[in-house]
Amino acid sequence: MVPVLGRYAGLLTVGLLGLVVFGPLAVFLPLWSALTLGVLSAGVAGLALTRIAVLKARCEKLSGEVDLLSRRLLKVETGTATAAAQPQPEAAEAALRAQIEELTVEFGLLSGIVRDLTGVVTAQDAEIARLNARPVAAPDLRSEIRAEIRAELAAPAPEPIPPLRPQAAALEALPVAATRPVLPASPAARPIPPLPLPPRPIPPRPIPPRPAREPEEEAEIIRAFEGEGLEIHLQPVVTLPQRKVVAYEALARLRVGGVSTEPETFLPVLERHGRTTELDRRMLQRAAIVTRHLARRGSETMLTYGLSPLSLFEPGLMRELARMAADDPALAGLVIGLPQASWRGLDAGQRGLLAPLRGRIGFGLDRPDDLRFDAAELAALGIGQVKVPAEMLLRPASERDRLADIAVEDTAPALARAGIRLVATEIGDEADVPDLIDLDVPFAQGSAFATPRPVRAEVLATPSDGPVPPPEPEPERRSFRSVLRRAV
């Protein structure tokens, strides 16, 4: 009761005063009392309106603050949901890296196209310059021909010769490089020496042109390739001097007309028809089956395959190989080889294609042009194996000095210090083996140890069953001279 009275004490006091004051006035002065009550009512109403306006302003302010608070809460909830829906930084970084690699590959392809276009334009410029330089000595020859024709026309003849004038008109319009016309025989005529023609420049190509074969023979090779004629043969790589098999090389063979042919026979035909990439794709698929078979048998034997240099210009093949290596760790035993010229001419796009393969499969260098191997540079590219023909290693010292910057005896140790193994290939004579051992060559390959043998069909059909493709070669009889040299 007291708090209520305290709260409304002012109103009660004003009410009592009004009753005490205006009660008698209403009796004695009713007009003035009515006027006073009206004024007081207006004042009270004004105060009430003022208070209502103040309360309304406060309500609007509170409503705005509540609205602002609700919007902030909604923003926080939206930000939380967005943050939860966003990918992790690692996934975003991987996606960005993949996009950068794609762009790098595209730029590399464009640079290769521009390089080829530059070579063609250079050849055309040289041809135009040659054609512009040829007419320098031509006016004298043309004037001599015209003089001889005029002399023949002016000479007396028993009957007119109408074909001479059209022939002279035709000679007037002949270009300089046209064939010299046949003139009527006369004692004053003398032979005109032919103009020397400079050789026509040929634009560079990644593979030197080879002579074309007969159309029927080429058609038979293409039919065999499109059919079931492609075979994979394996040739072992052995250690020296123990002759233990440590690796195999996958070699392509094409059975044409029931006869297995070497790559030198069918590879030029496939290059002219643009089928080398398909050859590499099919051979890599079979090599992957053999590599998985060796891994399931618990063998640490590696398998190498030499890619065509034209496959570097096919991004689809390299990406397919990268996906295969990423999905199957057993392909770590596969080594792809490229020519020395291809490794030296890698552009940004080709490096981008080879980058996903590094660490998942091995890289090798084969088909070298010289013995100038920079071990540090090769190791930086991820190359773990270098194959060199034995004939190049066993050349006379005068010829080897032109091919290498260091002594051949130091080539194998220099590569071994960088983790690269040297393999001598194409060894067909047993007498060359002791000389290679003297050069500290650790690995060798050739018909002197074992010839290439085909992989069994059941291994390629059902790779989960079947033995190791080719058996290790049996020890062969060696000459007494080689035994003595090895003992020394």
Image (spheres, helix red, strand yellow):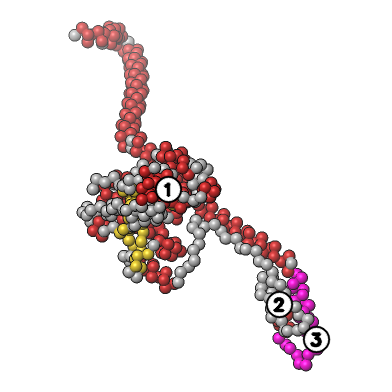
Asked if the magenta segment contains residue 184, the reply would be no
* Percent coordinates x, y for residue 365 in the rendering: 43, 48
Q: Which mark is residue 435?
A: 1
Q: Quadrant of residue 267?
A: bottom left
Label 3 close to label 2 by CB (< 8 Å): no
Amino acid of disc 1: Asp
Q: Which residue is mark 2?
A: 171
* Amino acid type indicated by mark 3: Ala
Position of the N terminus by quadrant: top left
Q: Sequence order check: which comes first, mark 3 or mark 1?
A: 3
For label 2, the SS is: helix
Q: Is residue 144 magenta?
A: yes
* Residue at left offset 75%, top offset 69%: 139
In the image, the segment drawn in magenta is 139-163
Residue at 72%, 79% (x, y): give it.
Answer: 169
Reading the image, the residue beneath label 3 is 155
Residue 157: horizontal and vertical position, in percent? Answer: 78, 90
